[in-house]
Image (tube, grey):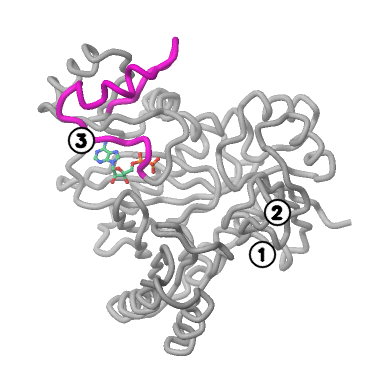
C-alpha cells in the first residue's frame, strides 16, 4: 500500500505537493480549512485544524502528518505525537517557526547571526531598546504574522502603544534593530529524520509591500563566502532545531557582507518555488521525500538562472483563465503555476518560473508573463 501523507492546510503549498506525490507514488490527503480551497483537488477532509478531535480523525488515516502552514496549535500537535502519530516537522521544531520570540532566543543559543532584539512588554522597555539603537526598531507580534502583517517600523515607543496595550498577561512583543540591509536572501535546506541534509543555492528575494514579489536563483553576485555562510546557517538551524522536511531561512545581507537571520519557515516556501522548474528536485517533491523518509533528491540547478515572479490579484477586466491562456501563448518557455484561487487585490493567485542561461532574459520573460495579470 502506498505511504499516506496527510497535509494539514489546503492552500497553494499543499496543492503543489499533489503532482510530486503522484510521481513518488505517495497517497496525499489534505485537511482543508473549507470547501473550494487551493488544494481542493486532493482534499479528503474539511475541518478546523485547531480542533483536536478533527485533527486526530484526519491523522488516524495517514502514515505521516505534515503541513501547509505553521498554525496548528502546540497542544494539538503534542497530543498527536502522544497518540503515536508521526509528525514532520514535529512540535519541538515547529515551535520556533510559530513564535518569533522563542526563535530569537534559540538562535542566540545556537550562535546564529541575527539582528539585535529584545522582548518588550511596556513602552518604557521599548523606548529603552530604541534609545540604544539610534531611535529606530522593528516591532513584531511574535505569533500569527505573515506577509508583513504584524510587523511595524517604529521611531518612538508610542508608535506601538496599541499593540503593547493589547498584550495579555505573560505576553510580550519582539523588537529588533532596524537592519540597514542591501537585499534579502533566502536559504533552503531539507532534512530527513535520520539527519540527511541537502541545501539549495541561496537566492535573492525581492519584497513589495511586505509580500514576496520576485526571486532570483542563485542570488546574483553572491560571493563564495556568502554562499557558504548561508548554507552553513541553514544546516546549523535544521540540525539544531531538529527540523524535518523543508526549512526556509529568510536572511538580510548588509553592506558589510554580513548575513542575519530574519525568520524561519518549516515547509515549502515562496522563496523556493523556482526549484519546481529550475532544480533537479523541486521543493515540493523534496519536502515529501523528507517527511516520507525517502532519500533526498539533487538540488542542482538545471540552468544558470531561475527567476520566479508572483502573480498577484487578478485582472481588472476579463478572467484569470483568459490571462493565463494569453500569457502561455506568448511565452511558451515560461512555466506558469496557478493556485485555483478567486482573484482579489494583493492575493497570490499563481506564479511564473523561467529558467534560462541569461539572467536578463529570464527576468524579462517572467515579468512579462506576470504583467498579463495586472
Ligand atoms: P512576516 O512574518 O510577516 O513575513 P517578517 O518578519 O519577515 O514578517 O518581516 C517582513 C518584512 O519586514 C521583511 O521581509 C523585511 O523587509 C522587513 N523587516 C523585518 N524585520 C526587519 C528588521 N529587523 N530590519 C529591517 N527590516 C525588517
Q: Which one is in front in this view, the residue at disc 1 or the one at disc 2?
A: 1
Residue nearer the viewer, 15 or 224:
15
Residue 258 on image: x %, y %: 23, 43
Q: Is mark 3 within 8 Å of ligand 1?
A: yes
Could you tell which of marks 2 and 3 lies nearer the N-terminus?
3
Q: Magenta residues?
A: 148-175
Alpha-carbon span between mark 1 and mark 2 = 13 Å
**Which residue does the image show at 33% across and 54% down from the upper left?**
227
CB-based contact (under 8 Å), mark 1 and mark 2: no
Does residue 243 show up? yes
Q: Which mark is residue 178?
A: 3
Question: Mark 1–mark 3 contact, CB under 8 Å?
Answer: no
Residue 252, located in which quarter of the rendered image?
Answer: top left
How busy is the neighbourhood of tag 1: few (under 14 within 10 Å), some, or many (20 plus)? many
The x and y percentages for residue 251 are 33, 45
Return the residue at label 2: 294
Q: Which residue is mark 1?
A: 20
Mark 2 or 3: in front is 3
* Residue located 39% across and 46% down the image: 147
Tell me: 97 left or right of 138: right
Please identify the quarter of the rendering in which residue 177 is found.
Answer: top left
Question: Residue 158 location in percent, x, y?
Answer: 20, 22
Indicate whether 275 appears above or below 257: below
The residue closer to the viewer here, 298 or 59, is: 59
Amino acid at each position: 500500500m502506498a505511504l499516506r501523507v496527510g497535509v494539514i492546510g489546503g492552500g497553494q503549498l499543499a496543492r503543489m505537493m499533489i503532482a510530486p506525490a503522484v510521481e513518488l507514488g505517495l497517497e496525499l490527503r489534505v485537511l482543508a480549512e473549507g470547501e473550494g480551497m487551493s488544494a481542493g483537488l486532493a482534499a479528503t477532509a474539511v475541518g478546523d485544524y485547531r480542533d483536536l478531535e478533527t485533527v486526530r480523525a484526519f491523522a488516524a488515516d495517514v502514515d505521516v502528518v505534515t503541513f501547509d502552514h505553521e498554525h496548528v496549535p502546540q497542544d494539538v500537535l503534542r497530543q498527536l505525537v502522544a497518540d503515536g502519530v508521526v509528525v514532520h516537522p514535529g512540535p519541538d521544531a515547529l515551535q520556533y517557526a510559530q513564535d518569533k520570540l522563542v526563535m530569537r532566543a534559540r538562535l542566540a543559543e545556537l550562535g546564529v547571526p541575527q539582528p539585535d532584539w529584545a522582548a518588550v512588554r511596556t513602552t518604557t522597555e521599548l523606548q529603552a531598546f530604541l534609545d540604544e539603537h539610534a531611535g529606530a526598531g522593528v516591532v513584531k507580534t511574535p505569533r500569527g504574522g505573515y506577509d508583513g502583517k504584524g510587523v511595524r517600523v517604529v521611531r518612538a515607543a508610542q508608535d506601538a502603544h496599541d499593540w503593547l496595550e493589547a498584550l495579555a498577561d505573560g505576553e510580550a512583543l519582539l523588537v529588533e534593530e532596524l537592519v540597514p540591509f542591501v537585499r534579502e536572501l533566502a536559504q533552503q535546506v531539507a532534512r530527513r529524520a535520520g539527519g540527511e541534509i541537502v541545501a539549495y543555492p541561496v537566492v535573492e528575494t525581492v519584497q513589495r509591500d511586505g509580500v514576496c514579489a520576485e526571486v532570483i536563483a542563485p542570488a546574483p553576485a553572491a560571493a563564495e563566502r556568502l554562499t557558504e555562510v548561508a548554507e552553513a546557517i541553514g544546516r546549523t538551524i535544521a540540525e539544531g532545531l531538529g527540523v524535518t522536511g523543508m526549512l526556509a531561512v529568510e536572511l538580510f545581507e548588509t553592506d558589510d557582507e554580513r548575513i542575519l537571520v530574519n525568520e524561519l519557515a518549516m515547509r515549502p516556501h515562496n522563496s523556493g518555488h523556482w526549484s519546481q522548474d529550475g532544480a533537479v528536485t523541486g521543493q515540493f517533491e523534496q519536502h515529501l521525500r523528507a517527511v516520507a523518509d525517502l532519500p533526498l533528491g539533487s538540488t542542482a540547478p538545471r540552468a544558470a538562472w531561475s527567476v520566479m515572479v508572483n502573480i498577484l490579484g487578478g485582472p481588472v477586466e476579463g478572467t484569470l483563465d483568459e490571462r493565463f491562456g494569453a500569457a502561455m501563448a506568448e511565452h511558451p518557455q515560461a512555466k506558469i503555476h496557478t493556485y485555483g484561487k478567486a482573484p482579489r487585490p494583493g492575493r497570490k493567485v499563481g506564479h511564473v518560473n523561467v529558467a534560462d542561461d541569461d539572467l536578463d532574459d529570464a527576468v524579462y520573460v517572467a515579468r512579462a508573463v506576470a504583467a498579463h495579470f495586472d
